[in-house]
Image (cartoon, helix red, strand yellow):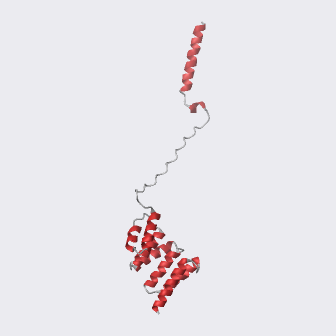
Amino acid sequence: MLKTSASKWLVIAGAALALFAFTPDSSLAAGDDPKPEPKPKPKPKPKPKQKEGALDQDQIYSVGYWQAKGGQYAAALATLQTASDQNDPRLQTMVGFALRKLGRVDEAMGYYQRVLAAHPNRTTTRQYLGEAFLQIGDPAKAREQLAEISKRCGVACEDYQLLADEIAKYERAAG
């Protein structure tokens, strides 16, 4: 009889264990609301891979800048046009500079004015715009840009000095 009793208990214990093992956890915690599974954070999108040997925005600007300052205006334009962000005010200013040096002053002024509409404190753009006004024979407008530069960085800043020198040269030549 002991054997039968022990066998029954063994069967009952095994059944209870099996029932416990296959019962979902939420049924054991009566009254607890199941917690929602945390959503996995989205993986950040990888940045587009730059082609090997391709230049980034700053590098393109730098190459275009030095080409333009070195007198290679057409090459500078070609370089600057490869930049991904054509709204970069530095880039637009240098495009204007290269265009102006190529004699395309009206186009250059459009670039300068777009930059200044969004970034009125860009004194280098104002300096180049002042030089463009001198190029078309309007020293009064160049002086207006000189005054704007003075308001923003004073008379000792480089952009003020450079435009003031260009105005003085223009006035000496005009006699």
Q: Is residue 156 left or right of residue 52?
A: right
Can I make out residue 96 in this image?
no
**Which residue is outermost to the front?**
70
Residue 37 lies in quadrant: top right
**Residue 81 spot, x, y in % from top left:** 40, 67
Where residue 15 sits: x, y (%)? Answer: 55, 20
Residue at 52%, 47% in the rendered image: 41
Depth check, front residue: 42 or 51 = 51
Q: Examine the rendered structure and indicate whether residue 8 appears above or below residue 44.
A: above
Residue lying at the far top of the rendered structure: 1
Quadrant where the N terminus lies?
top right
Residue 3 figure quarter: top right
- Which picture quadrant has residue 92? bottom left
In the displayed structure, 50 sits above or below 14; it is below
Give 95 or 74, whichever is nearer the viewer. Answer: 74
**Residue 58 seen by the camera:** yes
State the residue at coordinates (37%, 73%).
74
Q: Residue at x 54, y 23 (%)?
A: 18
Q: Would residue 143 appear left or right of 105 to someone viewing this image?
A: right
Tell me where residue 121 appears, x and y as whole percent: 54, 74
Position in image of residue 90 (x %, y %): 48, 70
> Please, which residue is most extreme toward the bottom here?
175
Position above or below: 152 against 81: below
Residue at x-position 44% and y-position 75%: 97
- The tally of labels here is 0
